[in-house]
Image (cartoon, rainbow, N blue to C red):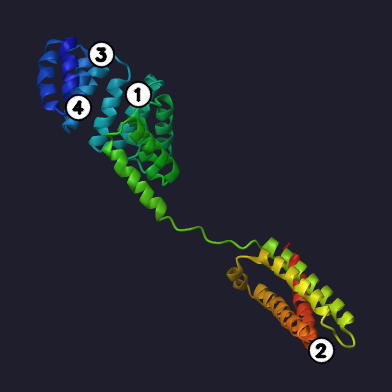
Amino acid sequence: MNAVLLRAAELTASGKPRQAIDLLRPLVAANPRHSEAWCRLAAAHLDLGEADQALDSAKRAMILDGEPAWPQRLAALALSDLGRHQEAAVAARESVRRKPGDWRCYVVLAEVLADLPDGGVEAFDSALHASQLAPTEARAFQVLGDAALRMRDWGTAEHAYRTAIKLDPSDADSKANLATVQRRRAAKPPAPMQLNKVQVWRALRMLAMLLVGGGLLALVAGMPRPTPYLGFFTGALVLCCVVVALRLRPFKLLFGLRKLAVTVSLLAASVVILTAWTVALLFGATTMQPLVLSWLCAVVGGALVYVGGGRKR
């Protein structure tokens, strides 16, 4: 009997379930209370897609003494093939209850739960538990990858499929699914840029202080007639403003809010005018009007910063 059971298992595993059935039918007819024989017969019927016969054989094994969880696993798979998904989940949970340390029970539970509309999370948890119970079994990681793929958890899916392939290099399904995961990860749209408003208003306040305070000092120092030496001071002031302005990135988002757009425009105009006047001053210009205009833009922009941005800290 053991030799027949072993031969039937080999035939089923090698893709010859019909021959396994032909061996097992006389065996169960002669030994109708042999649980393993009925389970082997149910497994062969499942491989042939004969879910009704598989379910009948699994039910026969359930009422006999033998392996406590195997008949429940086979019944769950047969019920799932028949479209009776709720019953399949009940049978799979019963197999886990009967043998909680068997990774195969969790694999079957994950497989049948995948067909339930709200079974994704539990299926993922069951597959993850199976992989923890059987870290050397490729099938456990293949099912984990499938569950993660359905939940769009690309990182876990890729890791699971890579592990399955490492454990079983001939696993074509995992290789195909790994390629699918990698394509979907590559096609994932980049996260939209976010504007840190707190940082922006803080940078604008510092920029306004530099332009108003530094511009006032330049006005006092340039009276009554500015000299080229004043250009070194205003050049350093411009450089400090540029360093602070770098904290306003991403710049294109600054104009999404009207108040921010007006404030940034005024302070930017102040820096541009101050830069132009500094260059002109170094080349011998003696007029003060551009500096006055730059300072006025800074004052108005600074007022908007403290009136509008101060409340948003």
Q: Is label 4 in contact with label 2 (beta carbons under 8 Å)?
A: no
Report the number of discs: 4
Q: Amino acid at mark 4?
A: Ala
Q: Earlier in the sequence, mark 3 or mark 1?
A: 3
Q: Amino acid at mark 2?
A: Thr
- Residue at the image point whose x is 35% and y is 27% from the top: 137
Between 93 and 283, the one nearer to me in the picture: 283
Q: Say what secondary structure mark 2 lies in.
A: loop
Q: Amino acid at mark 1?
A: Ser
- Residue hosting label 2: 286
- Residue hosting label 1: 95
The reply to whether residue 308 is visible in this rendering is no
Q: Give the spatial CA distance, label 1 vs label 2.
A: 93 Å
Estimate how packed mark 3 is, as few (under 14), some (14 to 19) or many (20 or more) residues with alpha carbons within 10 Å.
some
Q: Position of residue 241 (x, y in %)?
A: 73, 70
Q: Say what secondary structure mark 4 lies in.
A: helix
- Residue hosting label 4: 54
Query: Which one is closest to the eye, mark 4 or mark 3?
Result: 4
Query: Which one is closest to the eye, mark 3 or mark 1?
Result: 1
